Image (cartoon, rainbow, N blue to C red):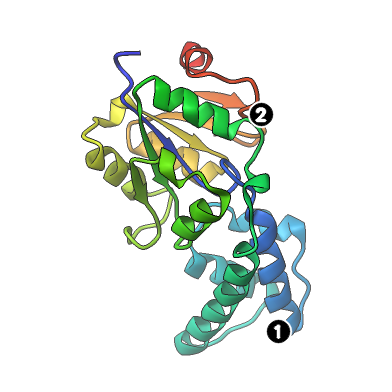
Amino acid sequence: MNRIKAFIFDLDGVIVDTAKYHYLAWKDLANGLGFEFTEHDNERLKGVSRVRSLEILLEIGGIDMDEQTKEEIATRKNNQYVGLISKMTSQEILPGVTDFLQSAKDAGLKIVLGSASKNAPLILEKIEVGHFFDVIIDGNKVTRAKPDPEVFLKGAVAVNANPAECIVFEDALAGIEAAKNAGMIAVGVGNPKILVGADAVIRGFSGLTVQKLLKMV
């Protein structure tokens, strides 16, 4: 226990499932551009920035456009996404997350959010878990996307922890890679066949305590 000072959590797919809202917004955008965007396609967008997500979407549709049009379209997509997440409630927190956050708080650990999302503060407010977090490092505070470790390293510095003293919880391969690139312990949340390279993989947080987690890593 004494070697771990901080838990760093990704947001989408770890604390709450906002991927469905991203998918709906991207799908509507693709339909407007005249092509189909599937849930399988959407897997490629997980854990990457909004700009890169748009580039992937346009690659799928075989569409070229200038930078100004890209910015306008990305803004339109984000406005629709914000409209959807503004209706979120605490009922959408993934199972076991609140109890695990409380367990970490009770253990005296620093709790950090490390997310590419620029809407992270709004989501935390809507699902009523913002009070658990000592620091929020989101897309407004970083310039490089995962698998670059910037978001996690900034989180560690903010709570005065060395990278080796941090455990990262991630549902995306790019996030696992970012955690390892930062020199941190990576815990995958989801399918172990997908989250290769993680130090441990959990299906979810139901029934998980800090003590149980530390025995896994």
Classify 10 Å Cα crowding around label 2: few (below 14), some (14-19), many (20 and above).
few
Residue 101 in percent (x, y) is at: 49, 31
| Residue 122 vertical placement versus 186 (above, below) | below
What residue sits 30% from the left and 16% below the top? 3
Query: Which label was assigned to residue 33?
Result: 1
Residue 207 in percent (x, y) is at: 64, 20
Q: Amino acid at mark 1?
A: Leu
Q: Amino acid at mark 2?
A: Arg
| Residue 183 vertical placement versus 214 (above, below) | below
Pick the front one: 208 or 188: 208
Classify 10 Å Cα crowding around label 1: few (below 14), some (14-19), many (20 and above).
few
In the rendered image, the quadrant that contains the N terminus is: top left
Residue 215 appears in view: yes
Query: Which label was assigned to residue 203?
Result: 2
| Residue 24 vertical placement versus 40 (above, below) | below
Report helix, strand or loop for mark 1.
Answer: helix
Dot 1 or dot 2, earlier in sequence: 1
